Amino acid sequence: MKDLSIRPSPGRGRGVFAERDFAEGELIERCPALVFAAESRPAVKQTALDGYYYNWIPDSDILALALGYGSFYNHSWTANADWVCRVDLNVMDFTALRRIAAGEEILVNYKYVGARFPDWYDAGRPES
């Protein structure tokens, strides 16, 4: 995809970077999603997919693996992009929350729900 690239992200492994400017509200990427039934969660968590999936429906154990670059966006409490599951289309849309400059890493809030926070998730959380 010419508008995005995967590059090393200091302290995060790999991440998704903008190859051009994105305007606030602009669709960055629409990713097809592989959706896993809730019963699959324990098995998925024991594979290399652990750490790459999203919660498909809030407050449920249904998982989604975003194809395209979707599962490579890194988490930030000060995200510059957002994501939403489009259950009707079986896709995940990633959109710019503000202007994103070419060369900037695209970061999303993973929006973990309930008690499923991984240990690292609260690191860097702004004080309320």
Image (cartoon, rainbow, N blue to C red):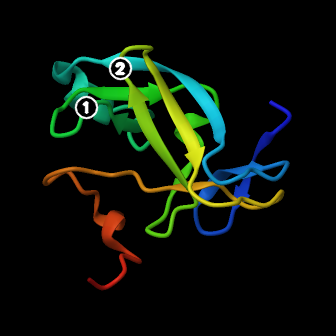
Left or right, 121 with reference to 78? left
| Image point (79%, 61%), residue name | 101
**Residue 120 numbered tag:** none
Q: Which residue is mark 2?
A: 87
Quadrant position of residue 77: bottom left
In the rendered image of this protein, does residue 87 appear above or below residue 98? above
Front residue of 8 and 19: 19
Left or right, 62 with reference to 8? left
**Quarter of the image containing the C terminus?**
bottom left
Q: Which residue is mark 1?
A: 57
Number of marks in picture? 2
Asked whether residue 68 is in view, the answer is: yes
| Residue 40 placement (x, y as % from top left) | 23, 21
In the rendered image of this protein, does residue 59 appear above or below residue 77? above
Tell me the kind of residue under disc 2.
Answer: Val
Q: Are marks 1 and 2 in contact (CB under 8 Å)?
A: yes
Front residue of 56 and 23: 23
| Image point (86%, 34%), residue name | 2
| Image point (47%, 42%), residue name | 83
Q: Could you tell me how far apart the alpha carbons at marks 1 and 2 are, in whole angstroms?
A: 8 Å
Tell me the kind of residue under disc 1.
Answer: Ile
**Quarter of the image containing the N terminus?**
top right
Q: Would you call the spot at circle 2 few (<14 residues within 10 Å), some (14-19), or many (20 or more)?
A: few
Residue farthest top in this picture: 89
Q: Earlier in the sequence, mark 1 or mark 2?
A: 1
| Residue 69 placement (x, y as % from top left) | 63, 35
Where disc 2 sits, the SS reads loop
| Residue 17 placement (x, y as % from top left) | 74, 52
Left or right, 5 with reference to 114? right
Where disc 1 sits, the SS reads loop
| Residue 95 placement (x, y as % from top left) | 58, 44
Asked whether residue 52 is in view, the answer is: no
